[in-house]
């Protein structure tokens, strides 16, 4: 390792340590709107499969409530959670299209 | 050269066999069986799982699997909690609508002793018709507003109609109509499909674990599970219909329930009732 490479490596390491210890950037209203739209789209897909989850609905409601009082950090986090839940319910409905037969009494 | 020819032939045969397997998916034995064979397998499963339970006793749900609960239930039956609903239903049934007609005018045999024939497949509509649906249709055709499908008046009316059928065996028919068979198959699929965040199917509780505890409840067997409906449920502090039962089950698995009397619930009721053909109506019932 020559001197220049060593300095660059040290600088990168320092930058990494600094950024990892810094607080996350606060979510904006735009972040919330994007996250909420993605969650709603996934939940709509689950609805088309007749397989929505109550927990997704609760997370969507929590996101809306937090956004209404300007808490976009919580609102965005709840929207992202709702999207993850909705995607899981879509996965469940899709995989169950065939897997339901595994439980059938023969 | 000759050896190479043999290898090429073997390869060709293998490829042809593989192509056939891809082109013709394996037929599951159950697909070829049909509803009657399904019902036999269903019944055999429960009878062999619970050899001490008499066949007709499955309609008593958790009381057929737990002696302590059975004793409590037998004492409760001396002053059954559904009695008020039953009396209300009896009065409602005979009270004329605004146009002078009654429920009796909408049903065969004046609506008495017919609960065991519901749900049925209606060839005109091409769909399953449940007793709850038929009651609300009767009201609407006579200029009355429909009732909620979940409890109160609907539970009272169905309690009375079930009472007049007590002891009569479920007699659900699947006519020779591809739409009826499709409704049955869709009901079966719904019954076995996992849903909700907890990833439960109806079968997950009522086929795999009847007699076991789920928190404070003893799970009822799927065989005969609709024969006792409507029920007074202590957990509800009141009466509930078949619609209410399905909706509660869905909610408990953290699935968003469907609309009462949606096609899925109607088909599910059709399938489950058919599975219990031959077992006596015992409703109205009482459950913890």
Image (spheres, coloured by chain):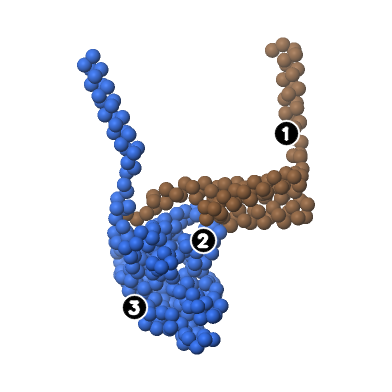
At horizontal 46% and vertical 82% (from top left) the residue drawn is B103
Q: On the rendered image, what quadrant is the N terminus of chain B found in? A: top left
Residue under circle 2?
B250
> Would you name the residue on which mark 1 appears?
A20
SS assignment at label 2: helix
Against B136, is B220 above or below?
Answer: above
Identify residue for label 3: B167
Name the side, left or right, on which B212 lies relative to A76: left
Q: Colour of chain A?
A: brown
Image label count: 3
The colour one sees for chain B in the rendered image is blue
In the rendered image, which quarter is residue A57 located in? bottom right
Q: Chain of mark 2?
A: B
In this view, the mark in front (1 or 2): 2
Mark 2, other Cα within 10 Å: few <14 / some 14–19 / many ≥20: many
Task: Give x and y (percent) for residue B125.
Answer: 43, 67
Q: Is residue B248 above or below residue B165?
A: above
Q: In which image quadrant can residue B209 be found?
A: bottom left
Vertical placement of B164 versus B219: above or below? below
Q: Which mark is residue B87?
A: none
């Amino acid at each position: 390792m020559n001197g220049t490479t060593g300095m660059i490596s040290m600088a990168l390491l320092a930058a990494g340590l600094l950024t990892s210890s810094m607080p996350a950037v606060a979510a904006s209203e735009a972040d919330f709107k994007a996250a909420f739209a993605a969650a709603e789209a996934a939940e709509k897909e689950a609805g088309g499969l007749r397989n929505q989850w109550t927990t997704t609905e609760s997370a969507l409601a929590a996101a809306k409530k937090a956004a209404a009082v300007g808490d976009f950090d919580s609102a965005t986090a709840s929207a992202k959670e709702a999207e993850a839940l909705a995607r899981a319910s879509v996965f469940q409905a899709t995989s169950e299209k065939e897997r339901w037969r595994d439980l059938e009494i023969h | 050269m000759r050896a190479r020819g043999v290898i090429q032939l073997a390869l060709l045969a293998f490829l042809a066999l593989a192509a056939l397997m891809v082109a013709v998916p394996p037929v599951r034995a159950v697909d070829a069986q049909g509803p009657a064979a399904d019902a036999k397998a269903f019944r055999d499963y429960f009878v062999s799982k619970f050899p001490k339970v008499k066949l007709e006793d499955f309609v008593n749900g958790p009381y057929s699997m737990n002696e302590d609960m059975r004793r409590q239930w037998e004492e409760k039956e001396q002053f059954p909690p559904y009695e008020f609903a039953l009396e209300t239903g009896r009065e409602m049934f005979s009270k004329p609508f605004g146009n002078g007609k009654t429920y009796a005018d909408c049903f065969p045999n004046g609506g008495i002793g017919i609960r065991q024939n519901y749900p049925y497949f209606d060839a005109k509509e091409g769909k399953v018709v449940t007793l709850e649906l038929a009651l609300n249709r009767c009201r609407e055709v006579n200029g009355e507003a429909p009732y909620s499908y979940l409890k109160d008046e609907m539970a009272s009316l169905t309690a009375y109609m079930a009472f007049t059928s007590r002891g009569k065996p479920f007699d659900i028919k699947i006519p020779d109509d591809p739409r009826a068979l499709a409704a049955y198959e869709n009901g079966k699929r719904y019954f076995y499909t996992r849903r909700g965040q907890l990833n439960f199917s109806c079968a997950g509780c009522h086929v795999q674990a009847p007699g076991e505890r789920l928190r404070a409840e003893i799970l009822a067997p799927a065989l005969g599970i609709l024969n006792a409906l409507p029920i007074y449920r202590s957990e509800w502090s009141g009466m509930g219909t078949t619609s209410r039962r399905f909706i509660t089950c869905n909610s408990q698995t953290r699935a968003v329930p469907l609309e009462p009397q949606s096609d899925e619930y109607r088909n599910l009721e059709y399938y489950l009732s058919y599975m219990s053909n031959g077992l006596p109506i015992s409703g109205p019932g009482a459950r913890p």
